[in-house]
């Protein structure tokens, strides 16, 4: 009996010691507390300031305010600012903002917008189909399989990138905004997306149960169509049903009215954009964690089953800037995306690496570089905008750049964001450039077979 008690005593003591490993001791706590000297006058003043004010207000670098100006050596001709409201459709607005100047110029319009709501309907619908097809593919995998977890965690969302837009435009065409205008649910997408996700998660479970009961692909496909019927109904009730045909006429800036014409979305896109070839647009990325001058492809990062995945060429920033400047000089706006919230003073529409001095305020060093911020999820692309302007020095080296944003006229500098070249280096991630602005050596790199990467990589968050 004594031996048994001794055994349990030793076991409990061992467990107790194990549980305490890594716990903060009182001696350690006293050392830690010395980092905050509550009797130091400057610490007291900073604590008072922080507890009574917004952090960004008291870290704002006043010196930068006197150096801000929004003039550029080269700028693309653009007209008007769009507003995505409370939705994650920046990638769609940006893609259309890159193309709509062509329509404005072609028909001599004062303004023009494609219908974001029209393509948004098909985007969520196609993403739902892709999600359900993937559930069928991985139905034999356990619930804790990485792909299965990904499918249930992220069934659909508002986010996307350039290839998301081109996939939709090639399949469904485009319509003017007046033909399928915004609705409350397109501008405030949270609840509609919540309902669609709920249906898809339920549908994914149903498909897995059927597969477990040895249902064949035809039976699973029939169930998928049934689930998509529910998704279509939710979308149509929130966004309206997309038109298959419509009538439209242009009114130019001189109020001259063109004749009314009948269109399908495909014929309208062909008339206004001509024989546009989206294969001539190349996504360039700066990811310092991966080898430069290599092609990469992100698995399942598309919205249309038969569409393109996200494919890009990884390049140093200086290479990307060279091609971006050439595009701007040729009056071609570009799809671009960045970590917009980092060091952005949205009140004046200006982003610079020194806008906010958090280190001086806290007396704490924040030392990660771009690669380290990406790996630790501290930074990544969050927002897409049209890159439209660059200011250069006497040697044609870039000094600052400008975005056309989609947050309305009241955000930033009349809807635009200016950012320094140093900020470009740290927080810009991707730019879509037409092949004609690339050099021959870079074009040859596009012939490589892309390395396939998983969709959950920290670098590959979609623009919202």
Image (cartoon, rainbow, N blue to C red):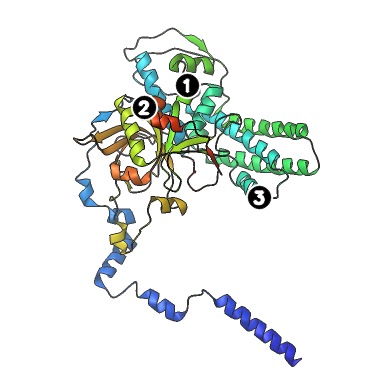
Q: Secondary structure at mark 2?
A: helix
Dot 2 alpha-carbon crowd within 10 angstroms: few under 14, some 14 to 19, many 20 or more: some
Other residues around mark 1 within 10 Å, as few (<14) / some (14–19) / many (≥20): few
Q: Name the image quarter holding residue 140.
A: top right
The residue to which callout 2 is attached is 437
The residues bearing labels 2 and 3 have C-alpha atoms spaced at a distance of 43 Å
Specify whether 165 is left or right of 315: right
The residue labelled by disc 1 is 277
Pointer 2 or 1: first along the chain: 1
Q: Nearer the viewer, mark 2 or mark 3?
A: 2
Dots 1 and 3: beta carbons under 8 Å?
Answer: no
- The front one of 170 and 66 is 170
In this rendering, the label closer to the viewer, 2 or 1: 2
Who's the residue at 19% across and 45% down the image? 66
- Viewer-closest of 448 and 354: 448
Q: Residues within 10 Å of mark 3 (few under 14, many from 20)?
A: few
Q: Secondary structure at mark 3?
A: loop
How many tags in the picture? 3
Which image quarter is the N terminus in?
Answer: bottom right
Q: CA distance from mark 1 to mark 3?
A: 38 Å
Q: Residue at x 56, y 27 (%)?
A: 240
Q: Is residue 351 visible?
A: no
Circle 3 is placed at which residue position? 145
Q: CA distance from mark 2 to mark 1?
A: 15 Å
In this view, the residue in front, 53 or 92, is 92
- Residue 351, position as x, y percentages in the image: 31, 44
Q: Position of residue 165 (x, y in %)?
A: 49, 29
Q: Earlier in the sequence, mark 2 or mark 3?
A: 3
Give the residue at the far bottom of this rendering: 2
Badge 1 element:
loop
Look at 18% across and 35% down and name the residue there.
394
User: Looking at the picture, does residue 139 appear above or below residue 33?
Assistant: above
């Amino acid at each position: 009996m004594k031996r048994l008690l001794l055994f349990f005593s030793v076991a409990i003591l061992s467990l107790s010691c194990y549980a305490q490993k890594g716990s903060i001791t009182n001696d350690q706590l006293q050392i830690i507390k010395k980092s905050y000297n509550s009797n130091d006058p400057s610490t007291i003043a900073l604590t008072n300031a922080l507890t009574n004010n917004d952090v960004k207000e008291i870290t704002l670098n006043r010196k930068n305010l006197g150096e801000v100006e929004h003039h550029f050596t080269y700028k693309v001709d653009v007209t008007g600012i769009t507003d995505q409201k409370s939705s994650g459709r920046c990638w769609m607005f940006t893609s259309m903002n890159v193309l709509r100047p062509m329509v404005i110029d072609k028909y001599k319009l004062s303004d023009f917008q494609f219908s974001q709501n029209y393509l948004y309907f098909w985007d969520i619908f196609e993403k739902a189909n892709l999600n359900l097809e993937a559930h069928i593919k991985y139905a034999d995998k356990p619930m804790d399989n990485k792909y299965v977890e990904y499918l249930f965690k992220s069934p659909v969302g508002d986010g996307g990138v350039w290839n998301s837009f081109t996939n939709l435009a090639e399949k469904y065409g485009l319509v003017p905004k007046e033909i399928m205008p915004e609705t409350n649910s397109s501008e405030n997408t949270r609840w509609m997306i919540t309902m669609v996700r709920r249906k898809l998660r339920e549908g994914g479970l149903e498909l897995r149960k059927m597969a477990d009961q040895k249902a064949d692909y035809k039976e699973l496909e029939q169930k998928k169509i049934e689930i998509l019927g529910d998704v279509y109904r939710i979308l149509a009730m929130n966004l309206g049903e997309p038109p298959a045909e419509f009538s439209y006429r242009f009114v130019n800036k001189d109020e001259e009215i063109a004749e009314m014409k009948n269109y399908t979305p495909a014929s309208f896109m062909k008339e206004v954009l001509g024989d546009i070839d989206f294969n001539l647009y190349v996504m360039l990325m700066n990811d310092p964690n991966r080898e430069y001058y290599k092609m990469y492809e992100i698995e399942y990062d598309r919205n249309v089953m038969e569409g393109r995945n996200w494919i890009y060429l990884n390049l140093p920033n200086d290479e990307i800037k060279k091609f971006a400047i050439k595009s701007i000089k040729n009056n071609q706006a570009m799809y671009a995306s960045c970590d917009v919230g980092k060091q952005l003073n949205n009140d004046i529409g200006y982003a610079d690496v020194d806008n906010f001095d958090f280190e001086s305020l806290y007396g704490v060093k924040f030392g990660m570089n771009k690669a380290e911020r990406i790996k630790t999820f501290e930074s990544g692309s969050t927002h897409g905008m049209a890159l439209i302007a660059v200011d250069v020095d006497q040697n044609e080296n870039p000094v600052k750049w400008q975005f056309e944003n989609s947050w309305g006229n009241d955000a930033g500098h009349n809807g635009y964001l200016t950012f320094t070249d140093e900020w470009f280096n740290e927080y810009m991630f991707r730019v879509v450039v037409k092949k004609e602005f690339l050099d021959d050596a870079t074009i040859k790199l596009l012939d490589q077979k892309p390395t396939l990467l998983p969709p959950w990589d920290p670098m590959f968050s979609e623009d919202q």
